[in-house]
Amino acid sequence: MSALDKKLLRDMVRLWAQALAIALVMASGVTTLILAVGAYRSLEETRSAYYERYRFADVFATAKRAPEFVERQILEISGVAAAEARIQEFALLDIEGMEQPATGLAMSLPDYRELRLNRIYLRKGRLPDPGRVDEVTINEAFATAHNFELGAKFHAILNGYKRPLTVVGIALSPEFIYSIGPGDLIPDDRRFADLWMSEKAMAAMFDLDGAFNSVSLKLLRGANQAEVIKQLDDILERYGGTGAYGRKDQPSHAFIDAELKQLKSMAQVIPPIFLLVSAFLINITLTRLIALEREQIGLLKALGYRRLTIAVHYMKLIVFIAAVGIVIGVVAGTWLGQGLTRLYADFFHFPFLIFKRGMDIYAIAAGISLATALLGGLRSIYTALTLPPAVAMSPPLPTHYAHLGIEKLQLIRHLSQLTIMAIRHIIRWPVRSALTVLGIAMSGALLITALFSLDSIEFMIDTIYFQADRQDATVNFTHEQPRKVLQEVEHLPGVLRVEPYRSVAVRLRHGHYNRKLAIVGRPPGADLSRILDRDNRPVELPQSGLLLSERVAKLLHVSRGDMVDVEILDDSRGQGSLDATSIGTRRSTRRLPVAGIIQSYLGLAVYMDLLALNEMLDEAPVVSGVHIAIDKSRTGELFKAIKGLPAVSAIALQDASLAKFRETLATNLTIMTTVYVVLSVIIAFGVVYNSARIQLSERVREFASLRVLGFTKGEVSHVLLLELAILVAAAIPLAFVIGYGFAWATVQGFESDLYSLPFIIKSNTYAISALVVLAAATVSALIVRRRIDQLDMIKALKTRE
Amino acid sequence: MAQSRKKSHAKTSPDVMFKVEGVTKVYHTGELDIHALSGVDLTLYEGELAVLLGPSGSGKSTLLNILGGLDVATDGHAWFRENEITRLTESELTSYRRDHVGFVFQFYNLIPSLSARENVALVTEISKNPMKPEEALGLVGLDHRLDHFPAQMSGGEQQRVAIARAIAKRPEVLLCDEPTGALDSKTGVHVLEALTSVNEELGTTTAVITHNMAIADIAHRVFHFGDGRITKTYANKKRVAPDKVQW
Ligand SMILES: Nc1ncnc2c1ncn2[C@@H]1O[C@H](COP(=O)(O)OP(=O)(O)OP(=O)(O)O)[C@@H](O)[C@H]1O
Ligand SMILES: [Mg+2]
């Protein structure tokens, strides 16, 4: 090994703590990059492979009842490659040992051919035999939640008849990677099932012989999806079509999209923060090292070492630090990536997982980190190269300190000389001080970004469960029911109050913006389930006009007072009208004013008065479901009674839903918060430790002299600690500001058609972030302080500079 | 003069090692220009041991730095043998230093993180025909301190390591800027002995800056500096051995 490399090695050993602190910051960047990009790619790749192999459809539509020949009409739409029609109905499930009824979506499987689209992956067993009304294949998650093996039995209420079903197969489907029950906030695999049954059996059960009520289409490459949807809607209109939609509105697909979007924004925001901070740390550390080694550099030049050799010498140092950071980052990133993917496996149902862990992402992460690191060192290396050998031989001039400019103030006279030393040092290096402050602030900001989501979600939970949807349970019907069903529900045991609602599929248009969604009609004075305005105060529904959630208003570019066109997709009058020859009956469209903008964190909410809605639809009043208040001591009886109601497709209990919501969040948020806290501590520690070490090295003679003059160890450390304290104190408010910004950006990045997050940061979050930063800073400062205590006065004064 | 040259032909026509003609050096520092050198002429012969004397700020170091290729002259010419060093580019100067010049500085300038042996190896690794680091350290009487770090050695020992480092590549010239400045007389004698023995045994042309008039007695020739010029030059009739120098 050359003498120069030996010097490098010993420098590394001497600087190991600083180097490690920097390497850890860099490692955090690498980790988060590999984690986010790796998870993004794995998820994306797995999903698209699954879609590809199991032929996930592009367009979906439901109808009331469409005769078989309509399928051929659909196939003639230009751009359609394949179609798969089926029967699908919701069913209440009665499972032994579970008091509460579960809900299943029963779907028909063609009896004598394979599925053309949305093929299912059979994990175990087989598909139901043709015509068997008592055989069912169920989704894997539901089976796991109930410990169902092949041969397990449960009951389902199918079109009013309670039937025993035997599990003959366990399967997964690309339609239900994310499988959520009607009215639920979060998947609950115990309470929601996908059921596949024989087509012949289902047709018989639901009186749909020779007909279907659901169709999926695969489009040709380059087909115009909007045009296909329009034509499909036209065809299905008279069969009770409720409006076709593309993948973007398919719930499972949309949820994964939302997750992918978040991973992407994580990959774009978090790693750069770490890499920039590590570049800064390398910059200050190397600048200091080169200042310390001025004479050594001059000497090397005097001895005839070439500039390139010297540059390479210092670059090796950077490369070494970066290499340590990259190795730690790669290991941690891979390990955490597996953890995250495992988490996904719990949350998303895939038959297989493709770990997309291409070498390229490692290469990119390593390349970017190394480049940032070298960039951080560029300036100081350049300084080293331009040092003329002769100048390097003469001792450096004493550091020039500026007057504070505030000396005239009375106040300053009261400060001790030691305090003034600390302040002058900060002012002497304004850029470095500012960047140190920024670095520490980043740590606090990251924490705020992590912790605020707890505040937001708590707020969202309070709003949804305790301010808006205050009902104890929601009962959904398989199909719209006449209003008299209300009395029936009211008379169920334990029911205290009922409030009906009616949901209608529509397409809202404003200018060239349009969106398919559901209008929910509610009775005036509804008190169980309330609508909240943007300040979360309950609002009364206006007698006419629509209340739109902020998200919908944004999508349609409307504000209060604008008119929107309401195209009614879900027209129950169309039901059964079989004069199929009169093609081209235009769907009815109304023009309604936007009466107000309201708050809603879930879905695309649009409300209107129930009476006005019924009037608009020009039909006998019907309801889609009811919100109920119940006597919680009688839920057992209630459930039993509901299991006997043929019209009911699902009952969602607010308590259970909230519990499940919290349970899911608890796992996810705990992991996330832990990761963020660790990352923030690494940054805070790295920045404070490095700047303290550099300060110490710059002032070691000064400190030694002070000790010689008779100052105590405590007084001397005071100078160093005070400077750090001032920097940290300045960083904390900045952290609040940056954290506020990050949190705001996170809320924006989170927003989708499925949910949006309220922007709430509690003072606790600020306080905790400040405390964590303070603690990390204090610990690192104290470590450096110990070095002052052990200061060897003689040695420090003997060495030059 | 030049009694102890190794090369026999030297007596008749000693080779010129350095030739300096009208070299000036001006430092521009804010308000006023500092004329560190204002027209220096000088010739140094091969194998010669020269001492440069003069008050502080008279330009000794500046000249030495220019001769050694550490600094560039503002005006004038300087030759190393037939090469004009005042015309060399930055990278040519680097090669010049690497191949021909050995430096010894007042503050030793050892690399603190390298041992004595390694500090010397720093040079031998990049030279064409070096001695072994151990050999160079032997020449300055430090064979027993090979693996000591600078912090573990006295000032005189450190300075001798610096000399060993300078001579290890068998340079043609050895430039020493106050090599004994930081030392007491006893250690100073050790250092001077090391310098004279290198000069005698290897025939290395040596220039030594000092503030100590007594040291001038060990030289073949003495140059007096004053105000950026050479004010007086003389050859010693009788050279004194280092251990006889009094200060
Ligand atoms: N980098 C520089 N910038 C400005 N002036 C300089 C610089 N280096 C040297 N000088 C000035 O040039 C003059 C000559 O300096 P030089 O170092 O050659 O003196 P010296 O004879 O070696 O003095 P000493 O015996 O104190 O080492 C002095 O006035 C000095 O202040
Ligand atoms: Mg000098």
Image (spheres, grey):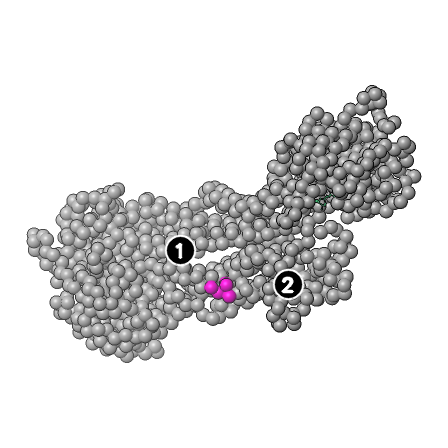
Q: Amino acid at mark 2?
A: Ala
Q: Is residue A361 visible?
A: yes
Q: Residue at x 36, y 50 (%)?
A: A124
Seen in the picture, residue A184 relative to B129 is either above or below; the reply is below
Q: Answer with mark 2 or mark 1, whichever residue precedes in sequence.
A: 1
Which of these two is toward me, A18 or A113? A18
Asked if badges 2 and 1 are on one and the same chain, I answer yes
Q: Secondary structure at mark 2?
A: helix
Magenta residues, start to end: A733-737
Task: Measuring from the top left, give residue A230's x and y in whole percent.
Answer: 18, 52
Quarter-of-image position of residue A468: bottom left
Q: Is residue B170 visible?
A: no
Residue A618 in magenta stretch = no
Q: Amino acid at mark 1?
A: Gln
Cα–Cα gap, marks 2 and 1: 44 Å
Residue under pointer 2: A422
Residue under pointer 1: A262
Lateral position of residue B106 relative to residue A5, left or right: right
Q: Residue at x 48, y 49 (%)?
A: A34
Q: Residue at x 77, y 61 (%)?
A: A708
Task: Name the subunit of mark 1.
Answer: A
Task: Measuring from the top left, give residue A328's x and y in whole percent.
Answer: 56, 49
Task: Measuring from the top left, give residue B206's x and y in whole percent.
Answer: 79, 33
Q: Count neighbours of disc 2 (C-alpha within 10 A) and say few if under 14, some if 14 to 19, many if 20 or more.
A: some
Which of these two is toward me, B214 or B169? B214
